[in-house]
Image (cartoon, coloured by chain):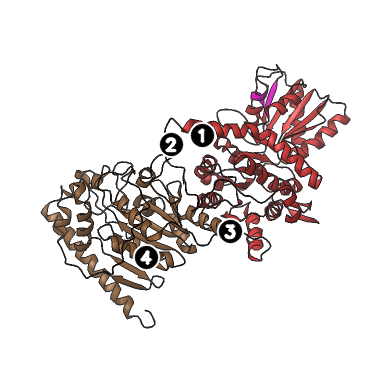
Chain colours: A brown, B red
Amino acid sequence: MKQASIPLEEYMGSGHLACQGCGATQAMRFALKALGPQTALVIPACCWAVIDGSFPHSCVQQPIYHTAFETAAVVASGLKAGLEMRGDSETTVMAWAGDGGTFDIGLQALSGAAERNEDIIYVCYDNEAYMNTGIQRSSSTPYGAWTTTTPVTNYKRRPKKNMIDIMAAHEIPYIATASTAYPHDIIRKMAKAKEIRGTKYIQIFAPCPTGWKLAPELSVKMARLGVTSKVYPMLEITENGQKLEVWKDFEPSSVREYMKPQGRFRHLTDEELDGIEREVEANWQRLLAKEKMLGSIPGLA
Amino acid sequence: MKKVIMGNHAVSYGVRASEAKVISAYPITPQTHVVELLSEMCANGEIDAKFIKVESEHSAMAACVGASAAGVRTFTATSSQGLLLMHEMLHWAVGARLPIVLANINRAVGPPWSIWTDQNDSLSQRDVGWLQLYVESNQETQDTIPQAFKIAEELQMPVMVVMDAFFLSHTYEIVDLIEAEKVREFLPPYQPEIKMDVNDPHSFGNLAGPDMYMELRYMIQEAMEKGIDVIKRVDKEFEKVFGRGYGVVEAYRCDDAETILVTSGTVASTTRAVIDEMRDEGISIGALKIRVFRPFPFEDVFEILSKAKKVAVIDRNISFGGHGIFYQEIKSALYGRTGIPILGYIAGLGGRDITPSVIREIADKALSDKNPERYINWIGVKR
């Protein structure tokens, strides 16, 4: 994984309202370090609507516009247009939403913004359920997981929605996944996104100890094991969806090692875990095949 | 310059003259011409604005929220289902105190599908906190747009300009076009004190506990209560520059009228013709047009109606299980201060024509009706 140095400047204070071990909070801290002070944020309903702090306080030094659940991408589009009409084309506008606001209720507005190729960075901090409302399943919740709306007797039996492929189908200039276990990588990808004009989509794997029934001190470890077990591949898609690069330079670990410490998977039998392992490997192979396929088309990068 | 244009284009010319900087909209009949002409004006440089062509009305209002938050003049237009889809973001614009201007072309709500006019779309947004101005002619439509921006920016409140589908939106009339250069004398560039700005960063709209929320709501009501005076003053200022003014209500032959018909929108024009005809017959009757629905001009309405002996309200809308919506407001304006009978008439829903003979029928019924308890009288319903 390519490294970037971590800027010393802090734009996020310690007085935020997140739970212990919150991945979404780590993700924001690193993202802001990469983007710097000339950044305006749009945050819909999600954990971060609370983490920011209550009026008149904010734990972030950059301006934030809080908005309705399904509108992050389009309010960011409007904000960018407004700033440009005011003569400010330098400010980076970043929409910052959870997986509920991205995969589900905000998908339409995000698709609209991406199709128009609005000059915004859209970050989804993905903790794989509606955590702010108290752990309900989203279309980002993985197969097998417990949530309060997918009890252990009827755990989620559909796979996580492939949001990356959906965004790639919009032919936007930059798409990436990232993980809170790799801050250098988050910073590199955010900095890269900042320099690209058009819609940038970055999906950050952000563990939620509260919702995953996980010890807070294991948050970063899970963010790493999710990647090294190939459950949550790290990738970049450039050239308007035509070039895919998958990060493979890691010491592989087992899916069971990733799932065992998480209470949300505790009910799964050995047989069910075997099935999940097979599916993870199949997804990984499909991804590598796609990387190879895109790389082999004459005339494409 | 005078030009024969449709009502929808009168909106577009009003927006051009007001020099809006960001426009965002989604097509819907009968509004579509408004934004078609605006997108053309943006494309050919007639207006220096960005047009965000969104995928829904909900997003249109959300884009306006973002743009207005950046501190620029922002406009959208819609109708019916589109306005209803915006509902959540209409509230957002109010809570965020954003001076967005929206033109709503009154269209009936489905099902069954109807593209024709009635007021239930805009009136069902009564309590969101938008100011609502109902216009009657193409000239008034165009002139009301810059007025709306000025009112909105002074009060830091969003304003809806409302007009009838087809009877106004698709009807061609002569309009004296206003130009941006002259409008600037009336409407200076929008320079808000508070906006999204990296050099003066704030967090907007974050959590406010029970110790704060109520005060913010109080301030919205305060702005609304100031609204009537602001609308009147802005109208006078417009009149000074352009020689045309419209008021918050318009009384027609009401001074000595025993009976007054209360109307809004294009029905007001037809009603005036009927009043003239009845006056010729020696009947003591007048008409009151309500131009401003929110904030409701309670005092102006009381002043005029309290001199009458009977009031008849024509509503092109209905609050199911209640009454006509203008009727309720009129009753509220007169409550406890007069004993005048107030009669309510529901007419013209889903675009059914309100012709002079329909208005005459309402007037005749009102004159002969001895039972003031009948709050709802349906006109022309096949039963």
Depth check, front residue: A66 or A162: A66
Above or below for A192 versus A14: below
Q: Residue at x 34, y 65 (%)?
A: A188
Task: Specify whether disc 4 shares its chain with disc 3.
Answer: yes
Q: Residue at label 4? A: A175
Judging from the image, mark 2 belongs to the subunit labelled: B
What's the CA distance linking mark 3 and mark 2?
A: 31 Å
Residue at 82 percent across and 32 percent down: it is B275
- Image quadrant assignment for residue B226: top right
Are there few (<14), some (14-19), or many (20+) residues within 10 Å of tag 2?
A: some
* Range covered by the magenta-colored residues: B330-344
Q: Does A163 appear in magenta?
A: no
| Total labels drawn | 4
Q: Local crowd at mark 1 within 10 Å, few (<14), some, or many (≥20)?
A: some
Considering every residue shown, the one lying at the far left of the view is A270
How packed is label 4: few (under 14 Cα within 10 Å), some, or many (20 or more)? many
Specify the label residue B208 is tagged with: 2
Which residue does the numbered mark 3 point to in the structure image? A85
Q: Amino acid at mark 4?
A: Ile
Q: Earlier in the sequence, mark 2 or mark 1?
A: 2
Q: Amino acid at mark 2?
A: Ala
Q: Amino acid at mark 3?
A: Met
Q: Secondary structure at mark 2?
A: loop
